[in-house]
Amino acid sequence: MAIKVMSIHMRKLNSLSNSLHQILIPQFPKSLTFSNIPVQKSFNHSNPSQQTYYRKQISLANLLQRYGFPASELHYFLTKNKFLLNSDLSEIEQSLGMLLLSFKLPQNLLVSLVCGSPSVLNLEFLKKWEVGITSLGMSASSSRVLCSILEFSRRFRIDPDRFSSCIGILKVLGFRDGTIIRVLEGFPGVVMINENEIKKRINYWVFLGYKRDAIDKIYSSFPRVLGFQVENRLKPLLNEFLDMGFPKKMIIQEIVREPRILSMELGELWQCVELLKKLKCRESIKEKIFGDGEFKAGFAVKMRVDCLCRYGLIRRDALYVLKREPRLITYDIEDIEKKIKFLLERMNYNIECLIEVPEYLGVNFDKQIVPRFDVIEYLRSRGGLGFEVGLRDIIKPSRLRFYNLYVKPYPECENIYGRFFEYVGKKTRHPVGLWKQFKPPKFPVSREDVVNLKSFTESLV
């Protein structure tokens, strides 16, 4: 009986297996084993070479930090200059000590020099300059001059003897010690110009009628002009000024007053003057812009364009910002830079926002920009804003509209907004005391007027 039951079960299993073979089972791709999965490379503590590299990086960072390098910038600095990790740490420390003690560089200038030109930490280079620095005499008394000379000589492989001979040439040509110091600080490339070419550039100013003191002032105020060639740069520029109708005497006076005029490119002054002629603004602003003449006004436009370009705007956009906000031409460069730094660093907007809202540079910094941003920042931190507030939303509204939108609904913002909320919060339709202007004036009453009035009233009885 048991054998029969087993045979029946075996027949059922055979039939089930035959039916399973007829079913198509989908083929899935083979999965990778854990050993075949690519793993992102990470720091291997068991690798001696990697441990050495890591320790050297930490040691170098600690060394630089002891000499005043900011910790927040060390990672970027070491990533950009990996050759320092392959150098001997003792030599780097010795080089830093020489810059600090032998060359007597202040800590901030030392950090600036090494960040701008890390190759000056070459020990052999510094030893050569430690011996040759005495040949420069008084010209090497300034720390800024030393930084400029070290950076330039390291970049172009120039020996101290060449700088010494260049200083001798400048003294023979009549340059004062103070002017030589300013030239070496602002334009160390003078060492690459031969003596005859320097004479030619000085004689050109003498030909134009400049005296020795005026030439010294030009080179002291704007040393880079010593690198401008006469035929290719100076003559065409001055001829352009004359062709625009400016008198020669006035041009000579303006160059002595502000030598940076010579930094203009050909056609730049003409473009700036054309922009001024097309300005659409109040007459009072135009009078302030052209108060010192068209030439100075054009140069003022050039300086503001250069300021905006230093922070990332292209020249076309900078001209557009000035065209939209002419008040900017009358403001000091320091005030403009103060607003731009606040926009980039504190408000975290990019420089292109000025193209959309050029009015930002025209409003008052302490009375409008800072109080409004403080209110918006407070509301943003407390979740009181249900939408994104852009630069246009901060600057464009009038004082009363901004108060009604962002200050009035939140009493705690009134203290943040400062004393200005008192003006907008209590603003009436007419200024206080205006009704007195419409009150009829009083006239003095004479004795005769009293008698006439009395007789008139008695006739009515």
Image: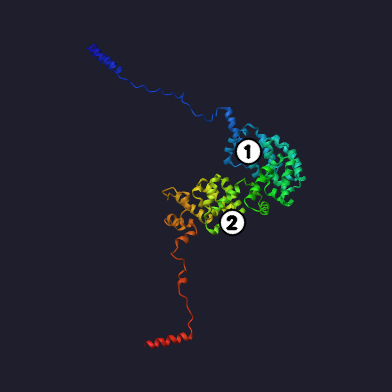
Disc number at residue 398? none
Provide the secondary structure element on which disc 2 rests. loop
Residue 50 visible? The answer is: yes
Image quadrant in which you'd find residue 162: top right
Provide the secondary structure element on which disc 1 rests. helix
Q: Give the Cα distance between marks 2 and 1.
A: 55 Å
From the image, which quarter does the C terminus lie in?
Answer: bottom left
From the image, which quarter does the N terminus lie in?
Answer: top left
Q: Residues within 10 Å of mark 2 (few under 14, many from 20)?
A: some
- Image position of 101 (left or right of 438): right
Query: What amino acid is at disc 2?
Result: Phe
To which residue does mark 2 refer?
290
Query: What amino acid is at disc 1?
Result: Leu
Q: Nearer the viewer, residue 402 or 234?
A: 234
To which residue does mark 1 refer?
63
Q: Earlier in the sequence, mark 2 or mark 1?
A: 1
Q: Is residue 343 above or below residue 78?
A: below
Q: Is residue 291 above or below residue 36?
A: below
Q: Position of residue 256 (x, y in %)?
A: 68, 52
Q: Residues within 10 Å of mark 1 (few under 14, many from 20)?
A: some
Residue 100 visible? The answer is: no
Direction right: furthest residue: 172
Q: Residue at x 64, y 37 (%)?
A: 118
